[in-house]
Image (tube, rainbow, N blue to C red):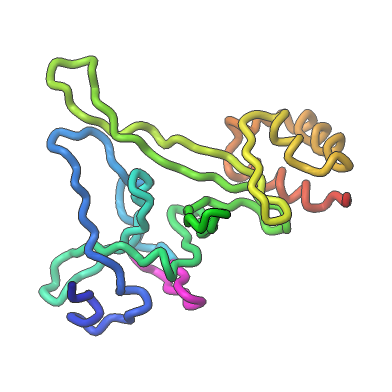
Amino acid sequence: MQGPDQVYGFDPLLYNGLVYRSFVLPQTKGTQYLLDAFDSQGTVTVRGITYSDVSINYDISNQKLVLKYKNAQGTPALIEISDAWLENFYLGGRHFEIETGTDSTKRIYQVLGTGTEKILYYRRKELKLDTRTESKDHFYSDPIIEMYVKADSHLIRFRKNKSFVSAFNPTKQDLIKKYIRKHKIRVKKANDGVMTELINYCNTLTGS
């Protein structure tokens, strides 16, 4: 298949993906994307090169980063940014990175924090059948979020305050508990700003 860079002279590092095709059933409610509309202020880093002000969206149902551009005819077109070269991207004010698991599987995570320990969110949506109506329409679920602490290159999943605290070295846990109590944090419900401050605080603590 001829790529868009061959047709239009775009940078092949960015415009080398497959044509994006989304096979959404008719009458499907909701969207497979993270955002309702493409973010024209997105930023993408591919093989060490950063591209700013690109129009992107994240298909969290199929785990694809989608780039919107105008083709040689001047009409909007969509391609998948190659996950073989994709390193990270900013979308809707959130920072995402690619993590490779022990089985070599790549996943896209939102990343919070600037230290050695980070919080990672993995988002996905499911396509479901609406059995409440006679029409039997399909709909996309709300985002399902898996939450992790990344420490020493390991991902430790957490769901509530207790499992979040236990993800850290025991020498840090009492201070983290006190911080959570003082700021009345519920990690399952806390927003990105609160969780970023929490993980950055965790990075100030010493412990082996």
Q: Residue at x 36, y 58 (%)?
A: 65
Q: Is 184 in front, or is 153?
A: 153
Q: Quadrant of the N terminus?
A: bottom left
Determine if the magenta segment contains residue 160.
Answer: no
From the viewer's perspective, is 196 left or right of 43? right
Residue 183 in view in this figure: yes
Name the spot of residue 36 as percent of width and height, x first.
31, 45
From the viewer's perspective, is 177 left or right of 94? right
Q: Residue furthest bottom?
A: 9
Q: Residue at x 41, y 41 (%)?
A: 124
From the viewer's perspective, is 169 left or right of 135? right
Q: Residue at x 72, y 28 (%)?
A: 162
Determine if the magenta segment contains residue 51.
Answer: yes
Name the spot of residue 184 as percent of width and height, x first.
72, 28
Q: Residue at x 34, y 44 (%)?
A: 61
Name the spot of residue 186 as percent of width and height, x first.
65, 29
Magenta-colored segment: predominant secondary structure: strand
From the viewer's perspective, is 118 left or right of 97? right
Q: Is 199 in front, or is 197?
A: 199
Vertical relation: 74 (above or below) 65: below
Name the spot of residue 151 as percent of width and height, x first.
71, 51
Vertical relation: 10 (above or below) 100: below
Instruction: Give the residues in magenta.
Output: 44-54
